[in-house]
Amino acid sequence: MSYLITGGMGFIGSNLVKKLASEGRKVVAFDKAPSLVGVNRCGVLDCVKLAQGDVTNLTDLLDAIKRFDVEYIVHLAAIHIGEPNVPIIDRSAATSPFEWINVNITGTLNVFEAARTLDVRKVVYASSYSVLPTGSTEDAPVKPNSLYGWCKALDEFLGQMYYDKYGLDNVGLRFGLVYGLGKRAGEMWVVDIVRKPALGEPYKLEQDPEMIVEWQNVKDCVKVITRALDAKKTGHRLFNTCNQPATLREAASIVKTFLSDAEIEFVPKAGARKHLFGFIRYDISRALKELGYEQIPLKEGFKDFINETRREASLPEIK
């Protein structure tokens, strides 16, 4: 029995691989370009199998599931470009809307179909507050305003459909803005409000300091995924997992409580966004009740991220 992690060499994926392998579970990191570099970063080189494949290719998934006797799948593979000024209609492989739809929708459909075909016990997949729920609970209608958000909304529909029609046990987890060691892409301009001061570097951010962000430590993502994998059949298919809204100014203030000499400057920007995931305070009580999940407090999460960043750079930890 093993656990297949799509996007296993990515930010959340590599952290999850490390956690599952450290518990003695057999883990398969499924990625388009799995590399020993990614596994070494996890520190579990001898405990993880690598499977090269693409979620847009159903055969790749079926072959990996059969070859490694997979009983659980965590689907994290996705395309999400969150950097400012990246044109959505760029035809390059990284930002083409055709590629986004192929990976983020067809890829998820293939995961569900492969799991159904080969009787996988459970699929846990990543959704996002980018679906922009219109209310605080998971049952509220969604109203995305981005291609990524619409992709994730359809993924949630597919998860419910595969459960209703085929009985496929699956759990969707809505994540916020995920920060932590190892993040290399997607909203780095937000995460750097913690990372750069941790390295002793000044940071200038061209955004509204009152922009609201739903902050989520990557360790919370790993925790809730693991809880979802281990839970007996849940009463619901979908869970909010993040309830830590804070403005950029508030985030900077927390950083300065640990790093008093941090240089963080906000530069006015016309038309700057007021939020990343809406103004609603999302309810995560369902995840607490059914998965036993609680978030790391934001101040504690920032301190942990600062110290991990400093350790990696051979700098002394903060107290």
Image: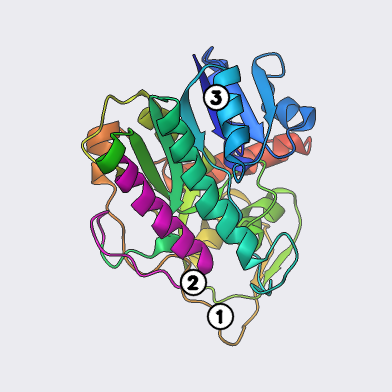
- Give the vertical position of 265 relative to 123 (above or below): below
The residue carrying mark 2 is 211
Q: Is residue 28 left or right of residue 254?
A: right
Residue neighbourhood size for the residue with mark 1, other residues' Cα within 10 Å, grouped as few (<14), some (14–19), many (≥20): few
> Is residue 16 in view from this perspective?
no
- Give the vertical position of 11 relative to 276 (above or below): above
Residue type for callout 1: Ala
Q: Residue at x 51, y 15 (%)?
A: 23
The residue carrying mark 3 is 65
The quadrant in which residue 92 appears is: bottom right
Q: Dots 3 and 2: beta carbons under 8 Å?
A: no
Residue range corresponding to the magenta coloring: 136-163
- Give the quarter of the figure containing the C terminus: top right
Dot label at residue 272:
1
Residue type for callout 2: Met
Earlier sequence position, callout 3 versus callout 1: 3
Q: Is residue 218 left or right of residue 117?
A: right
Task: Point out residue 27 in the picture as x, y percentages from the top left corner.
Answer: 57, 21
Helix, strand, or loop for circle 3?
Answer: helix
Toward the viewer: 184 or 69? 69
Task: Point out residue 183 in the picture as x, y percentages from the top left corner.
Answer: 65, 47
Helix, strand, or loop for circle 1?
Answer: loop
Magenta-drawn stretch contains 152: yes
Q: Nearer the viewer, mark 3 or mark 1?
A: 3
Earlier sequence position, callout 1 versus callout 2: 2
Q: Find the distance from the CA under tag 3 to the CA under tag 1.
A: 45 Å
Helix, strand, or loop for circle 2?
Answer: loop
Magenta highlight: main SS: helix
Earlier sequence position, callout 3 versus callout 2: 3
Q: Residue at x 40, y 59 (%)?
A: 153
